Image: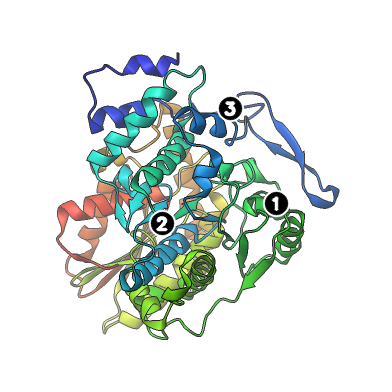
Amino acid sequence: MSDAASLQTSADRTYEAAVALLRSRIRPQRPEKNGGDSGPLQTRVPDGEEELDVRGTPSIKGMKEWLQTIGHSISAIDDLNIIHVAGTKGKGSTCAFAESMLGAFGERTGFPRKTGLYTSPHLLDLGERIRLNRQPISKELFTKYFFEVWDPLSKCETMPRYLQFLAILSLHTFIREGVDAAIIETHHGGEYDATNVIKHPVVAVVTPLGMDHAKQLGPTIRNIAWHKAGIFKPGSAVFSATQDYEETVDVLKQRAAENQALLRFVPRDDPDLPRKSLQLKPDVQRGNCAVALAATRAFLEAKCPKELGSIQPEDISKGISQFSWPGRFQQIDCGRTQWFVDGAHNEMSVSKAAEWFVDMSESLSTSPAPQRILIFSQQSNARDPGPVVERLASSLQCVRIDHVIFSNCNVQQANRSPEKEGSVNDAQAAYYNQLRQEFVKTWERLHPQSQTHLSPDIPSAINMAMKFSEGSDSMHILVTGSLRLVGGALRYLQQVDNGKVSK
């Protein structure tokens, strides 16, 4: 029996107990060298490129057996009618657009009657990761299904880790709830991702690729593409967003051919998308929606009863109008202070966040010009944040940034929800403080007119920005960087202001 089983008493079946048990499955931080449970896994990408070093045991290992332990065969998983989504940027938005458009079609026709969506990470509450008909699962349902999974798995010699368990829990929930369509986002990669226990998705999608999680999936963009394309399966409709890296196209095509799948590349726009829609700003969201629409059409063609017809312009428009994905290109209207919030943790993402902020800020500019503030944080052992800050600073050089606040992600003081993963020890805190000093140097080199500030935690950063806005006719504040920063900022803003939050 797993040691984790000892954390549970038979009488403690609460949501809080479920969260505590789930957190007990968080993997301890791996050392930088020779890390992992079973040593490095060696494999090869197409055409004999350099060997691929994947730290530790592949996340897919054990998934089939754990699912069988709780009574689910792989064929039962495939019966969920799955859209499987991998990629570097835009995965969550693409999933949410597809979910919303399927929902709009279902409201008109009766199919799908119920949809399921599994994504990660969450911003405010753990239930955001598992959604039914566009709503986060309730604490009651989460608790019920959690223990239906935990009880049998806690008797196994080896238990799933945190993300593996959540993937299993989502699939179990969707089976028990009888969804007609399930949209599943991968965690990081594809080939060895825990979600790739799915063998016959109806549709498989790869969103735009970039250099992220390179330590686990790299070192090159071709390696990353190889991993992401691991979700391509025979018989599935397979789509890729238009890719910025030309070398990824050949890898995706080759992987599709190996898996006997016809790969189609989706243009960054679709004539059936509404011309004017706040949900499709910036243009990167229009591209995400175009991919989601292609996936939705293919799904309905394969699974929808023919007499219900195809998706119509009114379904598309309604789905887009109902689209909601907090923390991604989100504007919060607090009167004379406008907050712009976007989780962006790699170079590709921050350039899009900066482009969106500049466009929105300039379109809302008044006389006198608004003050502009940036709040940024990036604390990760999985990626080098230096180039991210460099790209962000360069992308914002076309506007004046009056104040820049580099914050720690101390979300405990932002009333951090108990289910947030991870903690920061003294050594990590010292490292993060050193990082922030490097951020200041980079910023002052590219933006000498900006005033730079350091904040010990998220509430202090928010309060500092609010103080700067006192006496100003107009203030535009960009919060970007890690999703921990974004989630902590959204939670704190909910507590200190009743501003209208846009979808």
Dot 2, how many residues are within 10 Å of its Cα: few (below 14), some (14-19), or many (20+)? some
Confirm whether residue 138 shows in the render.
yes
Dot 1 amino acid type: Trp
Question: Along the line of sight, which residue is nearer the eye, 143 or 414?
Answer: 143
Taking the image as shown, residue 118 lies to the left or right of residue 492, namely: right
Number of the front mark, 3 or 2: 2
Label 1, label 2: how far apart the Cα atoms are: 30 Å
Question: Along the line of sight, which residue is nearer the eye, 22 or 482?
Answer: 22
Secondary structure under badge 3? Answer: loop
Query: What residue is shown at x 53% (from left), y 59% (from top)?
Result: 89
Dot 3, how many residues are within 10 Å of its Cα: few (below 14), some (14-19), or many (20+)? few
Marks 1/3 in contact by CB < 8 Å: the verdict is no
Q: Specify the quadrant of the image occupied by residue 415.
A: top left
Marks 3/2 in contact by CB < 8 Å: the verdict is no
Q: What mark, if any, has residue 180 been given in the picture?
A: 2
Dot 2 amino acid type: Asp
Number of the front mark, 1 or 3: 1
Q: What mark, if any, has residue 31 been given in the picture?
A: 3
